[in-house]
Amino acid sequence: MTITARTPLWVAAPALLAIRTDDFLGRWREALKTLDPEDIHDLRVSSRRLREGCALFSPLYPDGLSRVIRRVRKVTRLLGPLRNTDEALLFFRELCAKLPEPCGEEIDAILARQEVQRKDEHQRLAEGLEDLDAAKTSSTFARAVARPAVFPRPDVAVDPSTPIASFAAVALDERLADLLALAPAARHEGAVAAQHALRIAVKHYRYRIEILSFFMIDGAEEVIATLKTYQECLGTMHDLDVFADMARHEGLPPECECVILNVIAERRRTSFACFGELFGEHPFELIGEEVRRAL
């Protein structure tokens, strides 16, 4: 099916959701088969993209795609702990190779505990993905996505005949508004909670643009790349905050804890400086204007 800017919403939405659903289910099967860290990461990203697609088009569905959203959220949450452990292992392994003794020995102990935890989470993930049943989920999703409202009705928040481009303009501005509201607080270096919230908002905006980028003129790829850089920068700061919290609760000797926390703090300062430069070069207001021009 060819979807253009003029395609009615009730025609475009099921087709676009089907693309995201197929990607999600394919990556689910692959991750269950391999349990490879990259495949698990790809499934987690795909699950978030599908959730954003469901949130985007939920006003068109009488049930708001609630069953689909709940099932996808279960998969996303199932994947989270293993991803976090993998990131911690990568970070502390790299740190262990650079720090002098006795910090190396202390980090080795952290790594050993994380490896045990990873094995437990690996098993839990395999069992969880198997229990959720990709085949059953596939048929459930197919039925739900194929039933948008075709005519205006009281329990549907949008006119199904609205051209997809008109709907997209409003939907993208809604996500942009979230960024604009969060950005001022997040520009303060110590505003960890605001930066975490902004990271999530950037993801939502980026995924929404990706879903709708098929009918945008030149500029969508550059905007998506910029948002991905924002996401990576904010994600690095978030991970470092998590690692710092881990170091504080591992019962390390004070001198080793201090060394590790100083390394983390220095890296976070570097990441925050990168965030500040990015904000100066690509403010969200300008990104929003670029998106509107591309529609």
Image: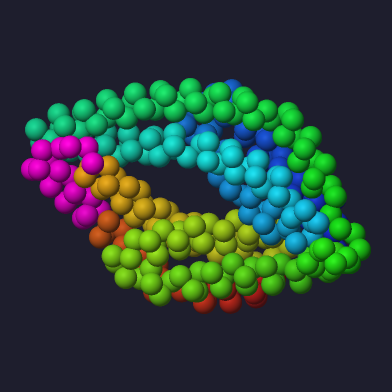
The residue depicted at 32 percent of the width and 47 percent of the height is: 242
Asked whether the viewer can see residue 98, the reply is yes
Q: Position of residue 87 (x, y in %)?
A: 37, 39
Quarter where residue 188 is shown: bottom left
Q: Is residue 21 left or right of residue 269?
A: right
Residue 217 seen in render: no
Q: Is residue 264 rendered magenta in the image?
A: yes
In the rendered view, would you say 268 is above or below 287? above
What residue is rendered at 31% in x and 51% in y?
241
Please state the extent of the stretch shown in magenta in the rendering.
249-267
Residue depicted at 21% across the width and 45% down the height? 248
The C terminus - image quarter: bottom right
Residue 25 location (% of width, % of height): 68, 35
Q: Nearer the viewer, residue 194 or 267?
A: 194
On the image, which quarter does residue 34 sit in? top right
> Is residue 117 shown above or below 45?
above
Identify the residue at the far right of this view. 151
- Residue 261 screen position, x and y as percent: 19, 49
From the top left corner, tell me how far across and down residue 211 is, in percent: 67, 56
Front-most of 170 and 274? 170
Quarter residue 81 falls in: top left
Q: Is residue 288 magenta?
A: no
Question: Position of 194 compared to 174: left or right?
Answer: left
Kindly report the secondary structure that dominates the magenta region of the rendered protein. helix
Residue at image x 20%, y 33%? 107
* Left or right of residue 292: residue 100: left
Q: Is residue 20 left or right of residue 77?
A: right
